[in-house]
Image: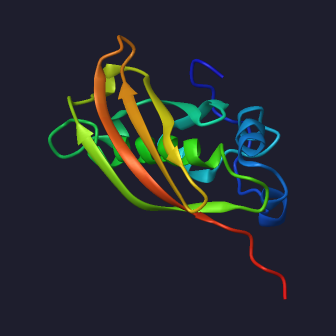
Amino acid sequence: MSPIQPASKFGVVPVATAMQTDGLTFLRKMITQDYPAPPFAETSDIWLVMAEHGRVVFEALPAHKFLNPLGAIHGGWISTLLDSAMGCAVHSLLKPGHSYTTVDMTVSFVRAALPTTGKLTCEGKIIHSGSRIATSEGRVTDAAGKLIAHGTETCLILNPPVAG
């Protein structure tokens, strides 16, 4: 799916369906469009393009609609890109029935991104994954490989609910 090719359908995968598959399969089904892209992807121009065990890659297109008052791409948009990649790196390790939620995230901005910067790539990778806590890192780079921002994220792994 490179360069950025918007999904043909957007939506939320039913929880029952999502909980029946492992995280990596889930993410790959989003890439192949067997599952819809999340609605925020249509608005944010942030797209999952690659997923493997413990590593994902997103592509994003900074645009005029994401400018802050000073004319650079808003840090919140870049943080959303990083959160997506770092969270999905964790998601790629989930067993069926498990989910996760972000506990904390730290972002460092290295240089400004502009609408003229062009496509950004964000790689998310696992640093550590345990039974309850997973930590990941992310790096946003431009087409020339220059670092735009980087971060780390800690996620809580949620076990399936116990029937009873």
The residue lying toward the viewer, choosing from 134 and 59, is: 134
Instruction: Please name the residue shown 79% across and 62% down the image.
Output: 14
The residue lying toward the viewer, choosing from 19 and 64, is: 19
Q: Could you say where residue 135 lies in the image, as x and y percent from the top left? A: 46, 49
Q: Could you say where residue 92 lies in the image, as x and y percent from the top left? A: 65, 43
- Left/right placement of residue 63 relative to residue 69 reads right
Q: Could you say where residue 138 lies in the image, as x and y percent from the top left? A: 41, 36
- Left/right placement of residue 132 relative to residue 25 reads left
Instruction: Please name the residue shown 84% across and 82% down the image.
Output: 163
Toward the bottom, the furthest residue is: 164
| Quadrant in which the N terminus is drawn | top right
Toward the front, the furthest residue is: 130
Numbered circles on residues, count: 0
Report the colour scheme. Answer: rainbow
Q: Quadrant of residue 161?
A: bottom right
The residue lying toward the viewer, choosing from 133 and 26, is: 133
Q: Quadrant of residue 49?
A: top right
- Left/right placement of residue 131 relative to residue 121 reads right
- Please tell me whether residue 93 is drawn above or below residue 18 in the rendered image: above
| Quadrant in which the C terminus is drawn | bottom right
Toward the top, the furthest residue is: 144
- Left/right placement of residue 44 relative to residue 28 reads left
Instruction: Please name the residue shown 59% across and 61% down the image.
Output: 100
- Please tell me whether residue 145 is drawn above or below residue 64 in the rendered image: above
Q: Could you say where residue 141 lies in the image, as x and y percent from the top left? A: 36, 23
The residue lying toward the viewer, choosing from 146 and 134, is: 134
